[in-house]
Amino acid sequence: MLKAGITGLVIFGILFFAVTAMNTRDLLWFWPIFKEIPVGIFVHCYGTDVEVQPGQPAFEAVTNAVNTSLTGNKRWDDLSMSDVTYQEYQTSPTMMVIELSYSPPATIHSMQAFFKAVDRLIIPLDGRHAYANAIFGLERGYTDPGSYHVKSTLPIVTALQEQGICMKP
């Protein structure tokens, strides 16, 4: 009887894993760690664009801060970024937003089927949607549906300030 129960539990576990992996298009859907290295970082700093390039001292610090913020539990919801909001993020003198480019595309592992091949992550740090710790994604120039919400984006803001990249006016 115990052997049958254990066998049933193992079969259920395997089926759960397989179905979730197929639905999410991600064999590592359970992995909470984000350790991607962008090919470019652009900070839209209150109306001024600042590029942080690989090889610059700030690049590693900002990348580590982003990876720290995206590691751990993430909540997905249907809050999406419109094209108008995206343009406002890039030009507004009242907002701070970080935009990271990835090649090859990055994956955010989760039980949702979104953000599996993003070439850009957009993270509002001050202004619209910043209060929600939202992470938006673009795949081949199109907005991914919804957004992930992380515990905190404060490590990113702190890294940008410590590196002298962006300070609130």
Image (cartoon, rainbow, N blue to C red):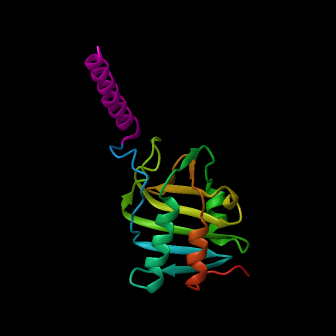
Magenta region, mostly helix, strand or loop?
A: helix
Q: Position of residue 82 (x, y in %)?
A: 63, 53
Splitting the image into 4 quarters, where does residue 85 fall?
A: bottom right
Region of the chain picked out in magenta, as a range: 1-25
Q: Position of residue 27 (x, y in %)?
A: 32, 43
Image quadrant occupied by the N terminus: top left
The number of discs equals 0
Q: Report the residue at 27% width, 17% height from top.
A: 4
Q: Is residue 1 above or below residue 154?
A: above
Magenta span includes 20: yes
25 left or right, relative to 73? left
Q: Position of residue 25 (x, y in %)?
A: 36, 41
**Most foreground residue, 31 or 149:** 31
12 left or right, relative to 159? left
Splitting the image into 4 quarters, where does residue 97 fall?
A: bottom right
The residue positioned farthest toward the top in the image shown: 1
Q: Is residue 2 above or below residue 59?
A: above
Q: Position of residue 141 (x, y in %)?
A: 48, 57
169 left or right, relative to 53? right
Image quadrant occupied by the C terminus: bottom right
Q: Is residue 4 above or below residue 22?
A: above
Q: Report the residue at 56% width, 57% height from top.
A: 135
Splitting the image into 4 quarters, where does residue 7 fall?
A: top left
**Most foreground residue, 24 or 152:** 152
Q: Is residue 73 above or below residue 6?
A: below
Q: Report the residue at 50% width, 75% height from top.
A: 62
Magenta span includes 125: no
